[in-house]
């Protein structure tokens, strides 16, 4: 449809228009007409890239800026509107593989506000149209997933559909039935409702997303850019059993149609409350009815600050007039209702240039291409480099040096190249060449069978040694404060440390020789190293950096053995029998303990007095074999610290309630999830006091608390 040349022109034009936005906004009629034509051209092109080719070449934010500018121009000069302007329709997402269904009410989009001022404009319009002085708004999170509409008739889920073009969607009922947070039956009849259509979003939690990506990376697959992409496509899978495997969740946030009509809840708040009471996952606990726009703005800002702590990816807040009786007078445009607006958080995508590629050697020798970017602001952070993961990723996306790339940085997710904007190429882009030799030690790189990564297998490779040392000192491993990468490098370069065992033979006089290390810093590091000897078996196992042995695996291993030496001769078959340890992990452990140089390091650690065996208490303590999960805030210590106490006394600390949990210890303001799950599974819940009673006589919580005051944390 577009020739490559035309695409280049349109991208150039897009960039020019984006630069000239302030000028466009002030254009007079004649200029406005010209600009509107240009905007339409580029928007049509971007619609095509987004909806038809599903490979957008600009960020959503940039697209929105163009779209809004056009819409505003057309509003200012209605005479320039054309019937085929992109502002006159809702774009379609229909793919044609599922039966089509008509929504009971059009599934519109939301108007967006990017600034406080735009929220105030919205409020002004609402007040003008309603005649109210102060409007009650219900404010809730805006979930970044895939929109759905569910229909319940006589309390049964009878239909679930995608958004489609807003009028007609795709019937994906069978797939949605597999989503556990969608009740198949809900007692709407209690509210006198016979038929109801509700709107919501299918999502995946950030935690689940992380897990999926970790698994994908371990398997050498390329990770997903964001949770939305991990969800996208799931709904349209042809096999519901496949859908069920993905841990999809659904949140519902809007009642869009009700029979009989007079049974509509009077306010939006009540509508969500009803859904909440009927067992749906809703924004009920996160929504607030705000009196007037100032409260709305404050609430939105509060959420923007904490968006990264939320378990799901959010792209903003939705502000809705609470009282439904005003919906009629406020009405709709063809695109959105006038009684609601989305306050969008800072965009997390941007386009920028890939300037060069360097190759980094990881802790286990994996060589990763890292793209250096022309620095660009994404979500308030300057991004100047991005992992390109592996050769397959680079090949699949055909990434070249000099390319314009669309980069995303969602939440705590690492920056990610979503797309190469091939249309912007001028022919000077250079394909990425993979090195044959290790950039750190020069030895020949190898690709092991079944793996996508190139690896340096030289165990003494300086880059790997430095990273192994750094990993040993990291918070989740031996937690040696002050042992950052720069210090490790200095220690290595001075020949003071070659492996983690050497750390424990360092003297303060060695440490003061490090650049920037005065006596105090040297003393502190020395002390931190000495204190780390007591961390325990699981942390040592994790800290050694055995391939595939993450923190969870290390904990599981530590539960099964009394001393690290037990692993030395443990046969493969026995390792595999340990729960959660598969063939790959077991082989990796065997390989680690079969190497003479690794055993030497362990001997060095042992001689220095690093704890490599369980204590008597850990083996035979009062909490032996009992599995503890904590919820809510504890007064004695943090949950992590309580977990350490449990482990010190022979118990097992876990973060999730399962059928194997012995006790759920409930602190202040506990979360609902763990409590509900414990109830479902019949797990005993105990109070913090009861927990303290169990450990009384073994742990002096008072002195720990005093220590905590002094040190900041207990461990
Ligand atoms: S209300 C007519 N509430 O955002 C208003 N939408 O950008 C119906 N979305 O199409 C939408 N969270 O898919 C509403 N709390 C929320 C939302 C939400 C996410 C999605 C929805 C909508 C899109 C508009």
Image (cartoon, rainbow, N blue to C red):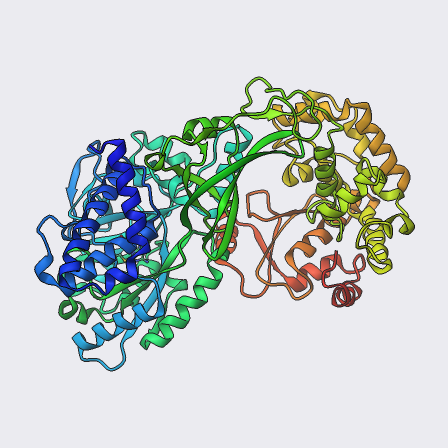
Looking at the image, the residue that sits furthest to the top is: 449
Residue 274: image location, x then y, percent: 30, 62
Q: Nearer the viewer, residue 113 or 685?
A: 113
Q: Quadrant of ligand 1?
A: bottom left
In the image, residue 586 above or below residue 127: above
Looking at the rendered image, the quarter that the N terminus falls into is top left
In the image, residue 560 above or below residue 450: below
* Residue 44 location, quadrant: top left
Looking at the image, the residue that sits furthest to the bottom is: 133
Residue at left offset 65%, top offset 41%: 551
In the image, residue 70 above or below residue 178: below
Looking at the rendered image, the quarter that the C terminus falls into is bottom right
Give the number of callouts: 0
Q: Nearer the viewer, residue 500 or 683?
A: 500
Residue at left offset 61%, top offset 32%: 580
Residue 226 visible in the shown view: no
Residue 364: image location, x then y, percent: 66, 31
In the image, residue 520 above or below residue 556: below
Residue 534: image location, x then y, percent: 81, 48
Left of 149 or right of it: where is 702? right
Residue at left offset 53%, top offset 24%: 452
Residue 649: image location, x then y, percent: 76, 50
Left of 674 or right of it: where is 498? right
Q: Nearer the viewer, residue 84 or 547?
A: 84
Residue 498 visible in the shown view: yes
Q: Nearer the viewer, residue 646 or 300?
A: 300
């Amino acid at each position: 449809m577009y020739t490559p040349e035309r695409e280049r022109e349109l991208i150039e034009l897009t960039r020019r228009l984006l630069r000239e936005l302030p000028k466009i906004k002030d254009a007079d009629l004649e200029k406005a007409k010209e600009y509107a034509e240009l905007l339409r051209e580029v928007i049509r092109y971007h619609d095509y890239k987004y909806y038809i080719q599903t490979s957008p070449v600009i960020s959503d934010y940039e697209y929105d800026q163009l779209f809004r500018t056009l819409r505003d121009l057309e509003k200012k000069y209605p005479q320039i509107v054309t019937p085929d302007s992109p502002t006159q329709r809702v774009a379609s997402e229909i793919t044609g593989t599922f039966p089509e269904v008509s929504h009971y009410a059009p599934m519109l989009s939301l108007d967006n506000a990017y600034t406080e001022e735009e929220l105030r404009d919205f409020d002004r319009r609402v007040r003008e149209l309603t005649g109210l002085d102060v409007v009650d708004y219900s404010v809730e999170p805006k979930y970044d997933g895939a929109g759905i509409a569910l229909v319940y008739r006589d309390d049964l889920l009878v239909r679930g559909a995608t958004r489609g073009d807003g009028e007609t969607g795709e019937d994906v009922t069978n797939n949605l039935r597999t989503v556990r947070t969608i009740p198949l039956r809900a007692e709407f009849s209690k509210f006198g409702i016979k038929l109801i259509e509700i709107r919501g979003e299918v999502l995946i939690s950030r935690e689940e997303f992380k897990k999926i990506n970790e698994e994908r990376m371990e398997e050498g697959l390329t990770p997903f850019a964001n949770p939305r992409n991990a969800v996208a496509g799931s709904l349209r899978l042809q096999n519901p059993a496949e859908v069920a495997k993905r841990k999809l969740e659904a949140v519902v946030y809007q009642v869009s149609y009700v029979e009989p009509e007079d049974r509509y809840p009077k306010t939006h708040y009540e509508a969500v409350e009803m859904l909440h009471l009927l067992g749906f996952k809703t924004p009920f606990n996160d929504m607030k009815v705000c009196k007037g726009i100032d409260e709305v703005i404050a609430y939105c800002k509060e959420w923007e600050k904490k968006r990264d702590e939320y378990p799901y990816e959010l792209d903003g807040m939705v502000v809705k007039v609470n009282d439904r009786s005003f919906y009629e007078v406020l009405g709709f445009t063809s695109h959105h209702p006038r009684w609601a607006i989305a306050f969008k958080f800072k965009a997390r995508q941007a386009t920028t240039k890939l300037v060069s590629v360097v190759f980094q050697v990881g802790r286990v020798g994996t060589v990763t291409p890292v793209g250096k970017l022309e620095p660009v602001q994404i979500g308030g952070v300057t991004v100047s480099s991005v992992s390109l993961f592996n050769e397959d990723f680079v090949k699949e996306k055909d990434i070249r040096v000099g390319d314009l790339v669309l980069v995303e940085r969602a939440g705590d997710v690492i920056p990610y190249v979503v797309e190469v904007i091939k249309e912007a190429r001028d022919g000077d882009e250079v394909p990425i060449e993979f090195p044959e030799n290790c950039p750190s030690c020069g030895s020949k790189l190898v690709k092991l069978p079944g793996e996508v990564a190139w690896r340096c297998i030289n165990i003494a490779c300086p880059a790997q040694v430095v990273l192994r040392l750094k990993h040993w000192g990291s918070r989740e491993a031996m937690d040696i404060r002050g042992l950052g990468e720069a210090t490790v490098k200095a220690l290595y370069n001075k020949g003071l440390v070659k492996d983690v065992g050497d750390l424990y033979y360092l003297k303060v006089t060695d440490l003061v020789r490090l650049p920037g290390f005065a006596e105090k810093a040297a003393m502190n590091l020395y002390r931190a190293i000495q204190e780390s000897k007591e961390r325990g078996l699981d942390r040592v196992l994790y800290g050694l950096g055995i391939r595939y042995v993450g923190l969870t695996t290390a904990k599981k291993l530590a539960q099964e053995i009394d001393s690290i030496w037990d692993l030395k001769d443990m046969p493969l078959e026995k390792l595999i029998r340990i729960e959660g340890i598969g063939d790959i992990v077991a082989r990796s452990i065997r390989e680690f303990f079969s190497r003479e140089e690794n055993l030497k390091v362990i001997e060095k650690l042992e001689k220095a007095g690093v704890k490599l065996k369980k204590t008597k208490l850990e083996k035979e303590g009062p909490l032996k074999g009992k599995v503890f999960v904590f919820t809510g805030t504890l007064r004695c210590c943090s949950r992590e610290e309580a977990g350490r106490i449990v482990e010190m006394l022979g118990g097992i600390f876990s973060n999730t309630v399962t059928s194997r949990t012995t006790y759920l210890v409930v602190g202040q303001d506990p979360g609902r999830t763990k409590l509900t799950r414990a109830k479902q599974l019949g797990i005993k819940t105990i109070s913090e006091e009861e927990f303290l009673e169990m450990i009384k006589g073994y742990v002096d919580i008072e002195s720990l608390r005093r220590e905590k005051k002094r040190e900041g944390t207990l461990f």
